[in-house]
Image (cartoon, rainbow, N blue to C red):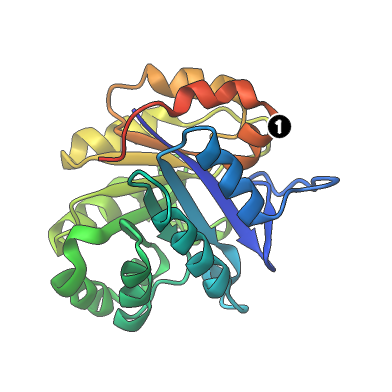
Amino acid sequence: MKIYPTLYLQNGRAVSATRQEDACPPMPMDLAEQLLDEGANRLALVDLDAAKGHGNNRELIGQILQRCRTRDRKICVQVAGGVRSSDQAQFFIDMGAALLVLGTLLHKSPMASEQLIARFQPFLVAAIDGRGGMIYQSGWVGTPGQSALDLALRAKSYGFQRLLYVDIPENPASEPDFQTARKLAEGTGLPLLMGGSLTAPRHLEAIIAQPSLTGALVDALLFHQNPRLMAFLEGACA
């Protein structure tokens, strides 16, 4: 199981995946350095501002990617949020990103998705944002649309070779929707990462028992708050 500690970036800060305020959150670079020092070989960076179309954290992401490249081992970094053009994709790849996530673009511009696939296929991951098996075209807000499986199959037809199921919880106490994750993995036959609702220490134990998942995105602040969770991060970047 590939665990990606995930930094959700907003206005240059690391924020909680559950949108709860942290009294004194660490600076993103400090949090990334802590994770790498403790042995993490993977990171996921989510630009919430770019995803919403209100600014971006591109420079910060570039700095974190550069810092990862100075390490004495390979660090797999996945970047998400506002990747909508070839120029943006090329920038992150040049900086060292191993994977790039496309989400909203799948709904708003299928043609652009296909163009990116033609050029960057090995790097791309299709994100399926959903709740209860239905997708939400505007991420964590908006109204449900088609079924998550339908969109996943469409992404596969475009040529995507990896999927990310972003499970949108009803509330912070909601348990992860592993049932939908299994349906997507089995229905498409593609490697599947899961994120979004994995916000509690007990969720790390639960995902290990999910054979349909190849990896999971877990809020990086959990590892900062509870260093004992670092034991889940074993495994080389591959």
Give how far across and how far down residue 222 sits, in percent.
64, 34
- 138 or 102: nearer the viewer: 102
State the residue lying farthest toward the right. Answer: 23
Total labels drawn: 1
Q: Say if residue 197 shows up in the picture.
A: no
Quarter of the picture holding the N terminus: top left
Binning the other alpha carbons within 10 Å of mark 1 as few (below 14), some (14 to 19) or many (20 upward) gives few
**Residue 238 lies in quadrant:** top left
Residue drawn at 66 percent across, 63 percent down: 10
Give how far across and how far down residue 77 sits, in percent.
39, 52
Residue drawn at 42 percent across, 59 percent down: 79
Residue drawn at 46 percent across, 50 percent down: 44
- 238 or 73: nearer the viewer: 73
**Residue 59 lies in quadrant:** bottom right
Classify residue 17 as left or right of residue 178.
right
Classify residue 103 as left or right of residue 238.
right
Establish if 5 lies above or below 202.
below
Secondary structure at numbered mark 1: helix
**Residue 55 lies in quadrant:** bottom right
Establish if 167 lies above or below 109.
above
Establish if 167 lies above or below 57.
above
Give how far across and how far down residue 218 sits, in percent.
52, 37
Q: Say if residue 189 shows up in the picture.
A: yes
Mark 1 is on which residue type? Gln
Give how far across and how far down residue 89 sits, in percent.
33, 73
Residue drawn at 67 percent across, 38 percent down: 171
- 196 or 171: nearer the viewer: 196
Classify residue 184 as left or right of residue 47.
left
- 230 or 101: nearer the viewer: 230
Residue labelled with disc 1? 225
